[in-house]
Amino acid sequence: MYLVEPSPEWPAAYARAVTQLHSAYPGEIRFHHIGSTAVPGLIAKDCIDILGLVSDLAEVGHARQRFETIGYEVRGAYGIEGREYFVRERPKVHLHCFQTGHRDAL
């Protein structure tokens, strides 16, 4: 992992990713920009981390193919019970989906 200087592009990259994710996911989901790129002026890993909160995580599981069609790789729980995790390489985005109220999504 490499750290990079802060980029004024990160908020716009987050907004573009969220627009694309909303177009692919048919259900209700709330997105939040998390991680080091969400903090203005902070040196960070060059990856947009997004938290997606849903009322029923099973719905996200049923929509896995939709995320794949927009370039995300499905990683499943990836070591964290109650999570659906998706990764896109270019631009680098990590999407962490949890059911609202999950202890790791507070």
Image: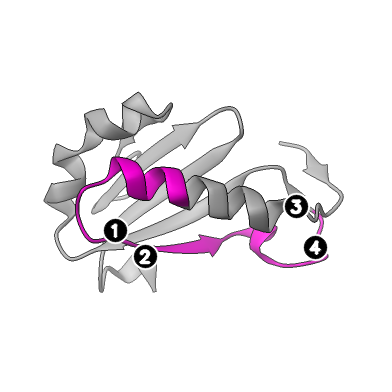
Instruction: Give whichever of discs 3 and 1 has the lower sequence position.
Output: 3
Q: Answer yes or no: do the residues labelled 1 and 4 have beta carbons within 8 Å?
A: no
Q: Quadrant of the C terminus?
A: bottom left
Q: Residues within 10 Å of mark 3 (few under 14, many from 20)?
A: many
| Residue at x 40% of width, y 51% of height | 96
Instruction: Give whichever of discs 2 and 3 has the lower sequence position.
Output: 3
Q: Which residue is mark 4?
A: 42
Q: Amino acid at mark 4?
A: Leu
Q: CA distance from mark 1 to mark 2?
A: 8 Å
Q: Answer yes or no: do the residues labelled 1 and 2 have beta carbons within 8 Å?
A: yes
Q: Which residue is mark 2?
A: 104
Q: Is residue 104 visible?
A: yes
Magenta segment includes 54: no
Mark in the foreground, 2 or 3 = 3
| Residue at x 36% of width, y 65% of height | 104
Which mark is on residue 39? none
Asked which secondary structure carries label 3, the reply is strand
Magenta span of residues: 19-43
Q: Which residue is mark 3?
A: 44
Magenta segment includes 34: yes
Q: CA distance from mark 1 to mark 4?
A: 26 Å
Q: CA distance from mark 3 to mark 1?
A: 23 Å
Q: CA distance from mark 4 to mark 2?
A: 23 Å
Q: Amino acid at mark 2?
A: Asp
Asked which secondary structure carries label 2, the reply is helix
* Position of residue 52 measured from the top left corner of the image (x, y, whole percent): 36, 58
Q: Which residue is mark 1?
A: 98
Instruction: Give whichever of discs 1 and 4 has the lower sequence position.
Output: 4
